[in-house]
Image (spheres, rainbow, N blue to C red):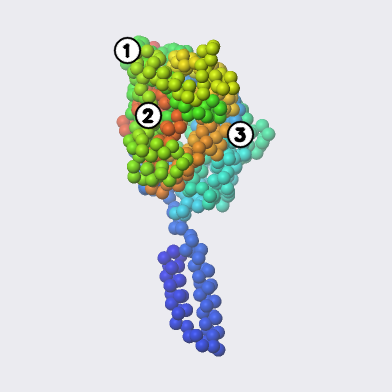
Amino acid sequence: MTSHRAAQRHKQSTAQARVLPRDGGARGANLALAVLTFVLLALLALPVWAEDKIIKSHGFAEFGALKYPEGFAHFDYVNPAAPKGGELSISAVGTFDSMNPYTRNGRAGALSSEQFESLMVESYDEPGSYYGLIAESLEYPENQDWVVFNLRPEARFSNGTPVTADDVVFSHNILLDQGLKSYAEAVRKRIPKAEVLGPHRVKFHFSPDFPRRAMISQVGGTPVFSKAWFDADPETRRLDEPRLDPGIGSGPYVLDSVDINQRITYRRNPDYWGAGINVNIGRHNYDAIRVEYFGDAIAAMEGFKAGIYTVRPENNSKSWATAYEFDAVSAGNVIKDEIADGNVPGANGFVMNLLRPKFQDIRVREAVQLAFNFEWTNESLQYGLFRHRSSFWQDSDLEAKGIPEGLELDVLARLGDQIDPAILSSEPVIAHASKPKRPNDRRNLRRAMKLLDEAGWAVGADGLRQNAAGEVLKIEFLLDSPTLERIVGPYVANLRTMGIDAELNRVDYAQYTSRRREKDFDMVSFAYRTSLEPSTGLYQQYGSEAHEYSVFNPAGLADPAVDALIGNIVDAKTQDVLYSNTRALDRVLRAKRFMVPTWYLDVSWIAYWKQYAYPENLPPYDTGLLDLWWVDADREAELKASGALR
C-alpha cells in the first residue's frame, strides 16, 4: 500500500465521520462504532505514512543516477577481450612482518588486502557510484534508515565454501571488536546493528543521530572474511595481530608464496567465482602478481633496470628526470608514460602534531610554514616537475577560491565566533611564495622570526628560541624515507636559522609505523586522501571524535567549526550543498595552518617494460594498473627472445 493510498483512505474515513448524526441511542452507538472504526483505520495508516518508498537497485549513487543500467555488460573503460595470462611485477621499499592487512601491530605486506572483496565495487568513471559485487542487489528506503543486501548465491571463498550473510555480519563485527580503534568507534555509533535475514540476505541499521549519506557505501565497502576460518582458531587468528597467513578471501587472487622482506607472490584463482559477472569483465587479467622488496629506492631503481620487476609507478621527480637514461629505454623496450589523473590530488605536506603544546599558537605554525621554500626545492631538487599545492581539494570544484559568497558565505557565517571573522571577507590562505635562488628566502624568514618573537619565543644567549619558562623550541621531523631526507634537510636548516632547535630523524620502517600510530612525533610528511565526493571519512581525518589516536588525523586536529562543516558535508542532500560546505571546510582548514603544503601532480608517472598494454579509454579516476592492464604475449616473447628480459 502506498502513502498516497493511505492518505486517500484517511480522507474518506474523515468524510464518513463528518456525516454521522449526533443524537443518542442507536445513533450514538453508531457514532461510537464509527469513531472506533476511524481510529483503527488511522492507526493502520500511520505506519504506511511513515514508511518511505523502498528502492531496489543493482547499485548505489550518492548523488544523481547511476551511469550503468541494470544488466549492463561491462564497464566502458575495460577491454572485454583482454587476454588472460602473464605476470605483473612491481616493487616495494622497506620491510614487512605480516600478511594481515588489518593488524594494529607490525607492518603488512603490499597488496595483502586485495584478496578480500566487498559487497559493492566502485566505478572508476563516476565518483560516488558503486555496483554489486558480492551483493547482486540492495534495498533501502528513501530516508536510508537501513539497507538490505541480497548476496549472489554463487559467491565463494577461495576454499570453495559459500559467502553467506553470516560471514558479512561477522566481518562487520570483528572490525568493530579488533579493528583500528578510530574506525571501530566511529562505525559503532553510526551502524548500531547488522543482522542476518537469511542465508544470502543481510540488513544494516543506521543510527538516527547521524546523517545518512555514505552510510550505504560505507557498509557496501566493508571487506568480507570467512567466519569459519576465524572460528577454527580464534586465539591465533585475530584481526588485530600480525600473522603470515592472511586468511581466506573471495577475491580473484590468493597468496601463493611469501619470502619475508624479499618478495610476495599472488596467483589468480582459477576457480574464482566472480570471473564472469559484469563488474569483473575485462579485469584481473594477470595470472600472477609479484612484489619485489628492496632496502631503498636506489636499489629498487636498479632492480627495474635489470628487469627484476617490470612496472614502476614513479613518485620521485629526480628519478623521473634522470634515472631513465638506460639502454632499454633508448631501444624502446621500456616505456615512460604519463597518464592523466582526474582525481583530486592527495593533500601532501608536512604535518604538525597539534597535540604538542608548542604548536597550539597559530603564529608558531605560520612561522614553521614560512621556513619552507617550495620554489627552490622544486627547481633545485625536483627538476621543476611539480606544482605548489594550497588547497586540500586542489584544482577541483571543491577548492575554495576568492572571497566567500552565496551558500558558502552563509555556511561560514552560521559558524559565528567558532571561526576567525576575517575568513568571511578574505581570500583563502594560499601557500606562500619564495625566491628560488637560494634555499632560505630571507624575507620569509624575517617574517617568520617576527611571528616567533610575538608568540613569546625569544632568542636566548645560545641562539636558540626559548619561552618564558626557559623551554627551548625543539622540532623533530620524523622520516622513514631517504628520498624525502634530501628534501627535508634544507627545510630543517631554515628552521635552525630561525633559532629553532630542529632535527631530522630518519628511523626504520617499523619504528616509524609505531611512532606514527602513537602520535609520538612533532612533524611528519603525510598525504590526506581526498575525494570528489567527501563524506564520513572526514570524521577520521579532521574530526575531533578520535583526534588523539586516529592514524588518519596525524595533526590531532580538533575544532568545533571543522566538526560542524563535516556534519554538513555528510548530511548534504544535493551536490550544491556538498560543494559549498566542502569549500568552506577547505577555507577553514587552510586558515588553521597545521600543515605546510608541498607539491602535487595532475598525471601519474608509470614506467614499464613494453609487454604491457592497457585500454585506450582508461577511466579518469584510476590508472587501472592492477586490474585493467594485461600482458601482450607477443611483446613478452620478443623481449625474452632478444635477451632484454629473462
Name the kind of residue labelled 2 in the image.
Ile
Give the labeled residue for mark 3. Answer: 239
x and y, in percent, of residue 308 in the image: 45, 16
Q: Residues within 10 Å of mark 1 (few under 14, many from 20)?
A: few
The answer to whether residue 551 is above or below residue 51 is above
Name the image quarter holding residue 591: top left
Name the kind of residue labelled 3 in the image.
Leu
x and y, in percent, of residue 148 in the image: 51, 50
Q: Residue at x 51, y 23 (%)?
A: 456
Quote the CA–CA distance across marks 2 and 3: 42 Å
Q: Are marks 1 and 2 in contact (CB under 8 Å)?
A: no
Q: Are marks 1 and 3 in contact (CB under 8 Å)?
A: no
Q: Which mark is residue 330?
A: 1
Q: Specify the quadrant that holds the C terminus.
A: top left
Q: Nearer the viewer, mark 2 or mark 3?
A: 2
Q: Is residue 276 visible?
A: no
Q: Secondary structure at mark 2?
A: loop
Quote the CA–CA distance across marks 1 and 3: 48 Å
The answer to whether residue 152 is above or below residue 495 is below
N-terminal-most mark, 1 or 3: 3
N-terminal-most mark, 2 or 3: 3
Q: Secondary structure at mark 3?
A: loop
Q: Secondary structure at mark 1?
A: helix
x and y, in percent, of residue 64 in the image: 37, 47
Q: Which mark is residue 430?
A: 2
Q: Is residue 498 visible?
A: yes
The answer to whether residue 445 is above or below residue 253 is above
Name the kind of residue labelled 1 in the image.
Ser
Q: Residue at x 50, y 65 (%)?
A: 46
Q: Nearer the viewer, mark 1 or mark 3?
A: 3
Name the image quarter holding residue 639: top left
Q: Residue at x 51, y 16 (%)?
A: 459
